[in-house]
Image (cartoon, rainbow, N blue to C red):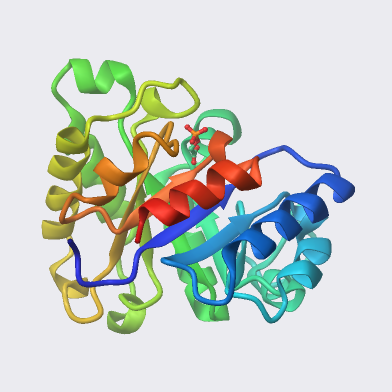
Amino acid sequence: MSEVRKLIAGNWKMHTTLAEARELARGIVQGLGADPQAEVAVAPPYTALAAVAEVVAGTPVNLAAQDVFWEEKGAFTGAISPVMLVDVGCSQVIIGHSERRQHFGETDATVNRKVKAALKAGLGPIVCVGETLAEREAGHTLQVVERQVKEGLAGLPADAAGRLVIAYEPVWAIGTGRTATPAQAQEVHAFIRTLLPELAGTPRVRILYGGSVTPDNAAALLAEPDIDGALVGGASLKAASFLAIIAAAG
Ligand code: PGA
C-alpha cells in the first residue's frame, strides 16, 4: 500500500441539473460520515458548483471543477478563470481530461498553461494523461504518457508536489466498461513516478487511476503500490456506487 492518503474523485462530466447535483452531493455527504477512508472530491459541471459548494461546506468533501482557463479575467467569452473557481469554493480542478483533448482541442501546451495558472491561484490540479487504444496496440503507451507528463507539467514550482495530482486514464478504458488490469495500471503509474524527479520529494505526487472504475474492481486497483486513488466517471453519478469505491480505498 502507498504511504499517502488515497484520493477518490468523482467526475460528473456533463451531467446533473441543479436539483440532481444537490441530491447527489447530499447522498455522498450523508453516506460518508465525518471520517472517510479516503480524501474525497466531486467535480460537478460549472453550473452546479455554487449549489454543491453549499452542500459540501464543512464536510470532508472537496469541490473540484472539470476544467479552467489560464487567464485571470478579461474578454474570453465562455471561459472560467482559476480565481473564479477559488471564489465559488473549489480547491481542485481537473485539467487535460481526454474528452477535453478529443473534443475541445486541448494540447499538452494548453494543459501546461492551465496547470501553472491553477497552482498560482492556490488550486490543486488533477492532470489527466493516457493513451488511446491505437497507441497502446502500437506499443506506444509509455512514450505517449511520457510526452503528456513532461510537456503538461514542464516548469512547475518545486513546491507543487503537495497539491499536484496526476490521473492516468487510458482512453480505451473511459466509459467503456473495459478497465485496465491492476498490473497494466501499476506499470504505467510506476513509470510516471520516474518522470518527475523534481517533484519526487515528500509528500509524493498522488497518481490516480481512471477508466471504468466500479465498486467491483476498485479494491484490486487501489491495492497496487503506485495507485494513490481513483478518478471516477460513471460510477460517481450514484451516491451508493461512489461511496462503495471510497470504502474500497480503506
Ligand atoms: P468512467 O470515466 O469512470 O466513466 O470510465 C472516468 C473519467 O473519464 O474520468
Residue 221, placed above or below residue 226: above
Which residue lies at the image location 21% right of the left edge and 37% below the top edge? 182
Image quadrant of residue 249? bottom left
Q: Nearer the viewer, residue 127 or 112?
A: 127
Which residue lies at the image location 65% right of the left edge and 40% below the top edge? 237
| Residue 210 appears left or right of 106 | left
Q: Nearer the viewer, residue 217 or 84?
A: 217
Q: Nearer the viewer, residue 28 or 146?
A: 28
Residue 136, placed above or below residue 122: above
Which residue lies at the image location 60% right of the left edge and 45% below the top edge? 240
Residue 194, placed above or below residue 179: below
Q: Is residue 143 visible?
A: no
Give the quadrant of the C terminus: bottom left
The x, y position of residue 68, in whole percent, is: 62, 58
The x, y position of residue 124, in whole percent, is: 48, 71
Q: Is residue 106 visible?
A: yes
| Residue 173 appears left or right of 196 | right
Which residue lies at the image location 57% right of the left edge and 79% below the top edge? 121
